[in-house]
Image (spheres, rainbow, N blue to C red):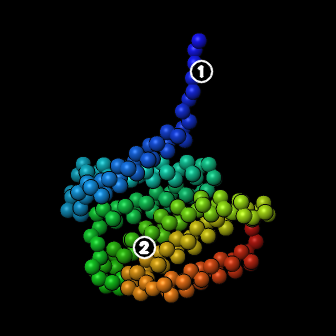
Amino acid sequence: MERPRTEIPLSLIAALAAGLCWAGALSLLALGGLSPELPLFSELRLLYYGLVLGAAILTFTPIEWSMRLKGLAVEGGVGVTMLLYALAFVPPPTEWLLSPPDMPVYTLLIGAIFLCSAAIIRPILYALGRRMFTDRVRAFDQRRVRRQSYECGLLLAALAALAALRSFTWGNVLLLTLAFTMAELLFLARVQAE
C-alpha cells in the first residue's frame, strides 16, 4: 500500500529559507568579523549582502502577496538592507546629530529605521484594521494602512533623532507619541476611505 505523497507548501519553504538567511546574516553581524576595513567585494561582504537581501526578500515578498500590500517588499528590502549595512560597515558616530562629520551616518540610520519599522508594522496594522473596523471600506483601506505605518515609522525615526540629539526623555517620548496619536485621530475623522 502506497502512502499518499504530501507536497511541502511553497510558503513553508520560503519561511525556512528566510529563517536560514536571517540566522546567517545576524550571526555574521555578531560573530563574523565584519568591519568597514574589509574590501568592497570581499567574500565575507558578498556573503553578507546575499544573506541580507535574501532574508529581506524572502520575508516581505510572501507577506506582500498574501495581504496584497503593494510596495511592502521594496520598502522592507531597502529598509532592512540599509539598516543591516549601516550596522555592519558604517563606523559608529562619535558626536551628536548636528555634528557635520557624523550627520550622514545619522541620516542613514534614521532613514533605515523609518523604512524598516514602517515595513514591519504595516502587516500588523492591516490585520488589526480588518478585525477592528466593522465598515468594510475602512477595514480594507490600503491608504489608511500605509499612512499609519509611515506614522509609526516616523515616530520611531523621530525618537532616534531625539536620542541622537541627546534629548531623549520620557516626557519628550510621551509628547511625541501624543502628537502622532492626535494627528492619526484627526486623519481618521476627516479622511474618507476609498
Q: Is residue 50 above or below residue 72?
A: above
Q: Residues within 10 Å of mark 2 (few under 14, many from 20)?
A: many
Give me the residue at 30% from left, 62% from top: 88
What percent of the width, then of the height, locates residue 24? 35, 49
> Visible in this render: residue 49?
no
Instruction: Choose between 171 and 34: the one closer to the eye.
Output: 171
Q: Any mark on residue 110, and which?
A: 2
Q: Give the x, y percent position of residue 71.
A: 56, 58
Q: Residue at x 43, y 50 (%)?
A: 55
Position of the C terminus by quadrant: bottom right
Task: Check disc 2 and give the amino acid type.
Answer: Ile
* Residue 25 visible in the displayed image: yes
Q: Secondary structure at mark 1?
A: loop
Q: What residue did someone put label 1 on? A: 4
Q: CA distance from mark 2 to mark 1?
A: 52 Å
Q: If you read the primary sequence from the N terminus, does the residue marked by circle 2 or circle 1 appear first?
A: 1
